[in-house]
Amino acid sequence: MPRPRKFRRVGFEPGVTYFKPRGVPMFNLGEIRLEFSEVEALRLVDLEGHSQGETAKKMGISQPTLNRLLKVARQKIADALVNGKAIRIEKDVFYKNQGGD
């Protein structure tokens, strides 16, 4: 039996939660779903420049878990950009808002 998953601390909620290619009707679009925890990992590592170790501690997860979150998030974003898909940002099951860094 796998061990229970930990909650992932997220220090913000994005104000914008949907992005789509310009000029493409919604009914013609594929869509990918990014979770708040994936966006938080991208924000802390790629945007703010924190190390993966620092970010893992802030989010209350292990560094290998953070690495997997980053890999999945980057693949989803690349898929959306290359294949013209919309991006929906949603709360995930293991999300826990911490109200700041």
Image (spheres, rainbow, N blue to C red):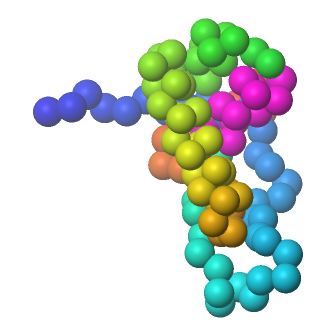
Tell me the quarter of the picture where residue 56 sits. top right
Q: Quadrant of residue 5?
A: top left
| 45 part of magenta stretch | yes
Q: In the rendered view of the protein, which quadrant contains the N terminus? A: top left
Residue sitting nearer the eye, 5 or 35: 35
Q: From the viewer's perspective, is residue 12 above or below residue 44?
A: below
Whether residue 90 is visible to the viewer of this picture, yes or no, is no
Q: Which residues are magenta?
A: 37-48
Q: Position of residue 52 (x, y in %)?
A: 63, 15
Q: Residue at x 46, y 25 (%)?
A: 65
> What residue is rendered at 59% in x and 75% in y?
30
Q: Is 5 positioned to the left or the right of 53 in the image? A: left
What residue occupies the far front of the structure in this picture? 82
Task: Look at the image and say whether residue 41 sits in the magenta stretch.
Answer: yes
**In this view, 24 is above or below 95:** below
Residue 39 placed where, x, y %?
68, 42
- Please tell me whether residue 10 is drawn above or below residue 25 in the rendered image: above
Instruction: Give the percent coordinates (x, y) of residue 63.
Output: 51, 16
What residue is drawn where x is 63% and y is 66%?
83
Main secondary-structure element of the magenta-colored stretch: helix
Q: Is residue 39 above or below residue 26?
A: above
Residue 44 in view = yes
